[in-house]
Amino acid sequence: MTDVQIATKMPSSSEAMDNAIVVTGLKTAFGDHVVHDGLDLEVRRGEILGVVGGSGTGKSVLLKTIIGLNHPQAGAISINGRDQASLTTSEERASRREWGVLFQDGALFSSLTVAQNVQVPLGEHYHLPTDLMDDLARSKITMAGLPLDAACKFPSDLSGGMRKRASLARALALDPHVLFLDEPTAGLDPIGAAAFDALVKDLSKSLGLTVFLVTHDLDTLYRVCDRVAVLGDKRILINAPLSEVVHFDHPWVQEYFGGPRARAAGIE
Amino acid sequence: MVDAAIIDEFVTFEKVDTQTRVTLKGNWIIDNAILIDTVTKEIFSRLGGSCETGRALAQTDMMRLDCSGLQKLDTTGAVLVRRFAAHMGEDCEATLMGVPEQNKALLDVITCCPVPAPTEPERPPWYLGPLIETGESVFLAVRSLGRLLSFLGLVLVRLFGSVSEPGRVRLVPVIHQMEVTGLRAMGIVGLISFLIGAVMVNQGAIQLAKFGADIFVIDMLGISHLRELGILLTAIIVAGRSGSAFTAQIGSMVLREEVDAMKTLGMNPIDVLVLPRLIALLICLPLLGFYADIVGVAGGIMMAWIQLDISPANFVVYFRDVITVEHYWVGILKAPFFAAVIATCGCYQGLRVEGSADALGMRTTKSVVQSIFLVIAFDALFAIFFTSIGM
Ligand SMILES: Nc1ncnc2c1ncn2[C@@H]1O[C@H](COP(=O)(O)OP(=O)(O)OP(=O)(O)O)[C@@H](O)[C@H]1O
Ligand SMILES: [Mg+2]
């Protein structure tokens, strides 16, 4: 039933169908501090897009604007072919169910245990039996790489990396179609970060997930991202596969990918 | 009861020799999770029952779980597949086969983690319950009072220590706190004192008129407002207004590890956070009390003029004759003590916040309740004290 409803709202042109997220002419500003100006971005369905850029260039702000937490001064954002500004409340609720978001600093509910945190979206959108909810929560917690005994701990009793994993488990709770990750591997040990990369890749392959991944981690870019978008000068400088981005002629990009860390990650 | 057609949509059974092949098919995704869960429970509750599928399952000791029919599978679906397998595993062996290539990774990643049965905590006999609770809460109350006292000691040590080392107390935060806790409180303190003063005269005059003694309403207002009500009301308002703010500010700093950062930077949280608030209140509460006295009496003057036709000038002359300055001193002397109580409770509860946003709310409530209680308790002690020394 819902499939039919969604299908009728999708634009007919096949090109637009291929894009999960389309941002056009975006302008965001805080007071007179302009963060983005005339930013265009397309994320294709089923791809993992890595977003890079210097600190403070507005990656987190872009993510928050796309998911509707920030209101842009100008520009349009459409997700799965639906213009976000024109949604009704119930459509908005339905479309939010299809996203998972991992915030830069976790944003777990501090008064709930990790398992309860994972169950919040489940309980909000589905009325599942308790034993299944418990089982799902625990499965997602182990899937995110946390030991089971973390399930009944409170966020304040976890390490920084564990909190990150717990919020990934919550982001994955509803089996979203689009996943927004803000620096998921920052603060993880290299083994954990590699496992995280592998998990995201596996999930996106088997579920056809579209992933919007903000990261500073060159290994992640190299291993999992299908395309890389570089944010700079208030817009997207280039949005292309890594091999092209590396040769892009822009001082920041050259410095970013030409540094010793990039060489260590195996980017030529 | 689940419709056979619905079961058929997700699972089919097929008997091959002595084995049963169970084929999972359809969309095992989160939107169907409730259905699949009921289907699973239905099938396994029927095991050995009268229905056909149940009997078919019961007669075999080896099962194969064929996943090749799965069209869509997500992580929730994978958990459900694992649960299905775990159900079968109880009395027979189950093997997964024919897993489509794109789902392999998912089924490998997901493991089923059935929740272990929680162990029942030991319960005391019913008649001991209230006793244990009472004992525990008395114990906790005494302990928190003790902690509060030792915190007060710590603060006083830092406060008097700063006399020899005046640079330790920062002037700007003190001024800022004075503005926030003193200046900005003048509106509400004034309003409430004015109304209370007016109401006292209004009600007192009605009662005293029965004895023809309505002029004594001025004595009553003067004594009760200057000695008790003015400062008590001010202290309670400030406790609710600023005491809670102290707890919330300091508590959220604790939650974001700002206080820890402060310690590592060599700053003493008591100097930086507690002393400015304490000093500001020590200065402002007596001033606010004085202001409340004036405004309260003004309220009384207005009401006496309207109701009893006593002109303000007459009121003031009579007031000067009957109210000695001791009454004022008794009230205002209490102010610094109340200020210390409010600042100490507020900051202490703020520093004790840990863990979650819930704890912050609980501590804020506690700080207000505790400081209002202590203010009133101190007020009672002072009343006894001043009476016994004849003031
Ligand atoms: N709520 C806000 N109010 C005012 N300015 C803001 C706000 N949020 C972000 N900014 C500003 O917007 C700019 C972009 O911030 P943003 O958090 O997106 O950076 P970022 O690219 O995510 O950096 P990092 O890599 O360090 O996370 C910064 O200059 C920041 O100061
Ligand atoms: Mg950021």
Image (tube, coloured by chain):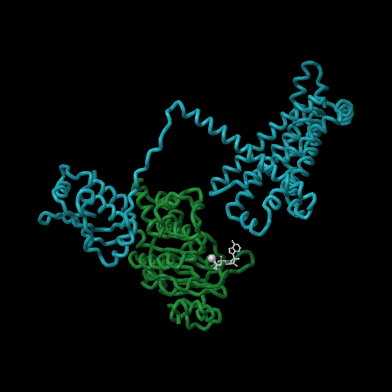
Measured as percent of width and height from the top left, residue B154 is found at: 69, 45
State which quarter of the image contains the C terminus of chain A. bottom left
Left/right of residue B133 with respect to residue B158 in the rendered view: left
Residue A143 in view of the camera = yes
Residue reaching furthest left?
B17
Measured as percent of width and height from the top left, residue B54 is found at: 17, 47
Measured as percent of width and height from the top left, residue A240 is found at: 44, 77
Left/right of residue B246 with respect to residue A213 in the rendered view: right
Splitting the image into four quadrants, where does ligand 1 fall? Answer: bottom right
Residue reaching furthest top?
B211
Measured as percent of width and height from the top left, residue A19 is found at: 40, 70
- Chain A, chosen colour in render: green
Pick the front one: A69 or B98: B98
The residue lying at 38 percent from left, 73 percent from top is A15
Pick the front one: A58 or A172: A172
**What is the quadrant of residue B241 in the picture?**
top right
Left/right of residue A212 with respect to residue B157 in the rendered view: left
Say which chain is cyan: B
Left/right of residue B235 with respect to residue A122 in the rendered view: right
The residue lying at 47 percent from left, 78 percent from top is A264
The residue lying at 61 percent from left, 64 percent from top is A30
State whether residue B318 is above or below residue A196. Answer: above
